[in-house]
C-alpha cells in the first residue's frame, strides 16, 4: 500500500482532522488522526494491518509468537495484526494509570512479542507497554504502528516500523503559534476528558 493509498483510507473515513488539538503526549497540533474512525470499518482495518505486516521483514514475521497492543487505541489494529500474522493478540491496559495484563491474559516466558500501536508520537506509551511486557516475561523484539508521528526520532529500544510517517508539526504548550492558540484546544482520542 502506498502512502497515498494509506492517506486515502484515512480521508475516506473522515479520520484526518484539522483544528487545534491537545495530543495525549501533551503537545499541540493543528492536525489529528482519529485512528478509531479509520479502524471502525473491518475491511479497511484488515487492509491496513496486512499492509503494515508486509512492511515487516519475513524473518521478523516468522519469529513473532504474540502480538500485544496498548488499550485503548491499539486494540483494534493489534487484533488485526494478529490476524494478518496468524498469531494470537492480546492487550495491556491502564485501569489505575499504569499498564498491566488483565482479563486472564498472560505472556509465556521468553515469548517473542510484537508491540502494535495505532499512533506513535513521543513513544512514551510504547515504552511503558514494552516495560510491562518484559516484566511479564515476554521479549519485545519489534514495534510497529499505523502512523509514525515522531518525525523519525522515536527510540523504543527495539526496531520500529510505521505504515505511514506523518510529520505534522507539534508544539510544546509554550511554543504554540499565536494563530493556533487563538482557537480552543480539543483533546480528542481515548484519553479525552469530558
Image (cartoon, rainbow, N blue to C red):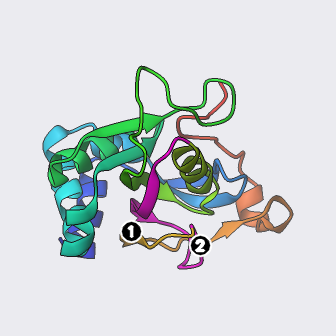
Are the residues tagged 1 and 2 within 8 Å (C-beta)?
no
Seen at 42% across and 32% down, the residue is 106
Give 177 or 1, whichever is nearer the viewer: 1
* Residue at numbered disc 2: 155
User: How far from the left and from the top, in percent, is residue 183?
Assistant: 71, 50
Assess whether residue 146 is covered by the magenta stretch. Answer: yes
Q: Earlier in the sequence, mark 1 or mark 2?
A: 2
Relative image position of residue 9 (x, y in whole percent): 24, 57
Residue at point 17% right, 45% down? 83
Residue bearing the label numbered 1: 162
167 or 68, which lies in front? 68
Residue 190 visible: yes
Q: Residue at x 38, y 68 (%)?
A: 162
Mark 2: give few (<14), some (14-19) or many (20+) Cα within 10 Å: some
Residue 76, above or below 5: above
Q: Is residue 17 visible?
A: no
* In the image: residue 72, left or right of residue 90: right
- Image quadrant in which you'd find residue 49: bottom left
Determine whether the residue tagged by mark 1 lies in a helix, strand or loop.
strand
Q: Residue furthest top?
A: 103
* Residue 107 is inside the magenta segment: no
Q: Which mark is residue 4?
A: none
User: Which picture quadrant has residue 99?
Assistant: top right
Q: Which residues are magenta?
A: 136-156
- Residue closer to the observer: 24 or 9: 24
- Which residue is depicted at the point 49% across and 70% down? 158
For disc 1, the neighbor class at 10 Å (few under 14, some 14 to 19, many from 20) is many
> Quick one: SS at disc 2?
loop
**Badge count:** 2
Eyeballing the image, is 183 above or below 94?
Answer: below
Amino acid at each position: 500500500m502506498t502512502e497515498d493509498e494509506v492517506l486515502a483510507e484515512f480521508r475516506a473515513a473522515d479520520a484526518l482532522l484539522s483544528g487545534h488539538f491537545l495530543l495525549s503526549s501533551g503537545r499541540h497540533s493543528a492536525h489529528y488522526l482519529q485512528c478509531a474512525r479509520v479502524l471502525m470499518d473491518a475491511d479497511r482495518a484488515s487492509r491496513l494491518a496486512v499492509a503494515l505486516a508486509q512492511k515487516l521483514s519475513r524473518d521478523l514475521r516468522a519469529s513473532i509468537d504474540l502480538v500485544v497492543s496498548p488499550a485503548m487505541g491499539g486494540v483494534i489494529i493489534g487484533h488485526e495484526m494478529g490476524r494478518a500474522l496468524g498469531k494470537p493478540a492480546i492487550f495491556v491496559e491502564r485501569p489505575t494509570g499504569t499498564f498491566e495484563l488483565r482479563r486472564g491474559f498472560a505472556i509465556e516466558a521468553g515469548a517473542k512479542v510484537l508491540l502494535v500501536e495505532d499512533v506513535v508520537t513521543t513513544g512514551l506509551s510504547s515504552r511503558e507497554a514494552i516495560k510491562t511486557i518484559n516484566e511479564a516475561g515476554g521479549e519485545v523484539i519489534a514495534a510497529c504502528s499505523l502512523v509514525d508521528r515522531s518525525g523519525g526520532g522515536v527510540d523504543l529500544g527495539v526496531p520500529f516500523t510505521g505504515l505511514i510517517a506523518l510529520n505534522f508539526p507539534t508544539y510544546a504548550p509554550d511554543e504554540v503559534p499565536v494563530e493556533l492558540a487563538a482557537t480552543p484546544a480539543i483533546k480528542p482520542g481515548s484519553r479525552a476528558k469530558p
